[in-house]
Image: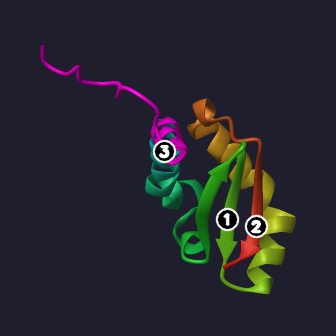
């Protein structure tokens, strides 16, 4: 009789189980982030795209790295609502609830 393929027999290492479970979730998250990256210049405009960089999307929050404190202030005070609205309009399925900025 040939050994079964797929699930291993006997105990597995915890790290292997965790890695297998997380692999699918990480790939899904990476696809979401890639979609935002690819459309970033269209969302924020060419001038802002050089100063603002999407860093990660986690729990409905898009973290954006900025190049300087002045850009951080401008983005957080004046551009946040506009950027959030455009992201929600373009990617409603991503469930983006907030945009936060940090120095990068």
Q: Secondary structure at mark 1?
A: strand
As measured in the structure, the alpha-carbon distance from the residue carrying label 3 to the one carrying label 1 is: 28 Å
The number of discs equals: 3
The quadrant holding residue 89 is top right
- Counting residues from the N terminus, which is met first, the one under dot 3 or under dot 1? 3
Is 10 magenta? The answer is yes
- Of discs 3 and 2, which sits in the foreground? 3
Local secondary structure at mark 3: helix
Q: Earlier in the sequence, mark 2 or mark 1?
A: 1
x then y, percent, for residue 62 = 68, 53
Badge 1 is on which residue?
A: 64
Give the residue number, with chain letter if any, for mark 3: 19
Which residue in the structure is indicated by mark 2? 101
Where residue 51 appears, as percent x and y from the top left, is: 61, 77
- Of residues 26 and 86, the one nearer the viewer is 26
Whether tag 2 and tag 1 are in contact, CB under 8 A, the answer is yes
Q: Foreground mark, 3 or 1?
A: 3
- Tell me if mark 1 has few (under 14), some (14-19) or many (20+) residues whose alpha carbon lies within 10 angstroms of its own: many
Judged from this view, the residue extending furthest toward the right is: 77
Q: Residue at x 72, y 43 (%)?
A: 59
Mark 2 to mark 1: distance in Å? 5 Å
């Amino acid at each position: 009789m040939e050994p079964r393929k797929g699930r291993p027999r006997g105990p597995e290492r915890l790290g292997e189980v965790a890695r297998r479970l997380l692999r699918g979730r990480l790939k899904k998250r990476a696809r979401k982030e890639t979609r935002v990256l690819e459309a970033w210049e269209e969302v924020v405009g060419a001038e802002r795209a050089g100063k603002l960089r999407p860093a990660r999307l986690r729990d409905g929050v898009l973290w954006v790295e900025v190049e300087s404190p002045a850009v951080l202030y401008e983005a957080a005070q004046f551009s946040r609502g506009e950027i959030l609205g455009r992201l929600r309009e373009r990617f409603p399925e991503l469930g983006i609830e907030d945009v936060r900025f940090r120095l990068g």
